[in-house]
Image (spheres, rainbow, N blue to C red):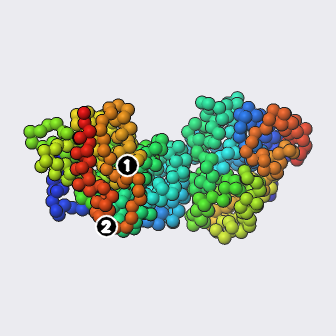
Amino acid sequence: MLNKNLNQKLFDADVEQIPTRNGYGEGLVSAGEEDKNVVVLCADLTESTRSEAFAKKFPDRFIQVGVAEQNLATIAAGLGVSGKIPFISSYATFSPGRNYEQIRTTIAYNDSNVKIGGAHAGISVGPDGATHQATEDIAIMRAMPNMKVVVPCDAIEAKKATVSAAKVWGPVYIRFGREKSPVMTTKETPFTMGKAEVMWTPGGARKKADAVIIGCGILLSNALRAAKELEKEKIYVSVLNSHTIKPLDEKKILDFAEKAGAVVTVEEHQIAGGLGGAVAELLAKKLPTPIEFVGMQDTFGESGKPNELIEKYGMGVKDIKEAVKRTISRKR
Amino acid sequence: MAYFHEDELKYLEKTATRIREKIIETLLEAESGHSAGPLGMADIFTALYFNILQHNPKKPKWPDRDRLVLSNGHICPVQYVALAYAGYFPLEELRTLRRLNSRLQGHPHRGTVPGVETTSGPLGSGLSQAIGIALAAQMDKKKYWTYCVASDGEHQEGNFWEAVMFAGKHKFLNLILIVDRNNIQIDGYTEKVMPLEPLRAKYESFNWHVLEIDGHNIEDFVDAVNEAKAIYEKPTVIIAHTIPGKGVSFMERDYLWHGKPPTKDEAEKAIAELRTLGKKIVSEHE
């Protein structure tokens, strides 16, 4: 049963679709209105990272660095130790991809108050191909001490995550997609960094889930579709939106994993080192539980339409349903 | 030109010698670290911490302080020693350099040592951070100056030139870059490993104002900083020609001393030399 605080038209054919990066753009403006120390830096991708609205509204607080992601991160590092709250906008393959070491040393270790916005993440980037599809970014950011990692599921959540990132001290990585994706949440849906949200629970008289799907990002809409379809087969699941991968909401994840006894993780990222890795590490340590991983299986993507790619690389509704059945079959 | 009172210059030059001695002692105690760069930059760091910088060692976070960003973090022994003599922390603490639980990390880390503005060591990223700090000052209409000390070798990093290009665009920053042109890097002489020359022409073509000085002449350096502050339409780089290992004859100009500390015998010899060669190093004005 879909949580009441979510968009109830989610399963309609004409569900509203907005790219998550748009939420980033709106969030930057809101954060900028709330705090004059918010500054935005961009590496020649102002329009496509949706930094444009901020640049127009606050030209004195917008810094264009040109095609130079290493400089992007390090200038922001200097601003972030001088009372500013810099957001750096680029594509995730370049930032935090190309400038990984600058982020590590001058932002994370240096504890500079910089927020890293990685756009065009995941295979749903589509026709640009694998060079521009970041599928390792969660892993490299999650392994970094002092770094928080957030993957919003839709444009509304992306806006909340952006505004919230400006308010917490320290380095935060937020990941966005390029293409339009279903709006799952509403303005009223709660968002707290570090706190997972329940999106779906077993319907009708059934109280206990057979498995829990823990996901992040735009693929949660596939997870919810899978949950709905599985009910027709009398398989009952819960779906958790673990938008914050670091710090992980350990308590809620353990609670749901314990009740269901079987877990599936869903993310538009390599299965190594991402949300799946984080959940598996937690369960291995505290509560060994059968787990299946939906995500990129140690391979690069290619050009294509977003949905074609998601299907081809095993992250479609069908794949999630199969993963649920596999993990349930492994229960003892 | 120079307006120093003779006594003040003597004081600065003696301070530089004390700093050199303490660098040798500190490296000997640490049993690892870099010798040549810190000795070569002792005069510049003395001038910065004991004459140029507006700072308060008792209030290291004073908002209006001048900022010093050390880009080539591996020469931090000279900064640590200068900070200690300036009063940021006790001199005895220098004995903990590179040891477990020390505030004095092998490469400087912001937040642990008072007076250290940024974490550094990985080369090529200090100028960008200094630019960020100077941009914040400009946005907040603060008057403080940001100084960046960088090595010559780190000009081989792409990030460095990204920053040089950026500063050429934002010319009104209160920013001064000081390049330690000592001609050595770990693998050998810079012009052999990856030539940097013509360095002046490179900066000029990126719209920088370029000053070149003898990095062991404190008066010249202070003059250069004053000139840099007077140049509004361009960022200024002071290319300080220094002798790596300056003051210790067997270390001078030898790239093999880039990344190693002296042994006990070598340290004794070096300190003895710093003392007996006093006329040369302590003060050329005595």
Please tell me which residue lies in front, A1 or B219.
A1
**Residue that badge 2 annotates:** A305
**Residue that badge 1 annotates:** A271
Please tell me which residue lies in front, A245 or B77.
A245
Q: Residue drawn at (61%, 49%), measured in percent from left and top?
A: B122
Q: Is residue A210 left or right of residue B141?
A: left
Please tell me which residue lies in front, A18 or B212.
A18
Disc 1 marks which amino acid?
Answer: Ile
N-term-proximal mark, 1 vs 2: 1
For the C terminus of chain B, which image quadrant? top right
Q: Residue drawn at (65%, 39%), measured in percent from left and top?
A: B106
Disc 2 marks which amino acid?
Answer: Lys
User: Mark 1 packing: few (<14 Cα in 10 Å), some, or many (20+)?
Assistant: many
For the N terminus of chain B, which image quadrant? bottom right
Q: Is residue A20 above or below residue A212?
A: below
User: Could you give the CA–CA distance between mark 1 and mark 2, rounded to whole angstroms?
Assistant: 21 Å
User: Mark 2 packing: few (<14 Cα in 10 Å), some, or many (20+)?
Assistant: some
Coordinates of residue B13 in the picture (x, y in percent): 81, 44
Q: Residue drawn at (82%, 35%), measured in percent from left and top?
A: B267
Q: Is residue B177 left or right of residue B281?
A: left
Q: Residue drawn at (88%, 39%), measured in percent from left and top?
A: B273
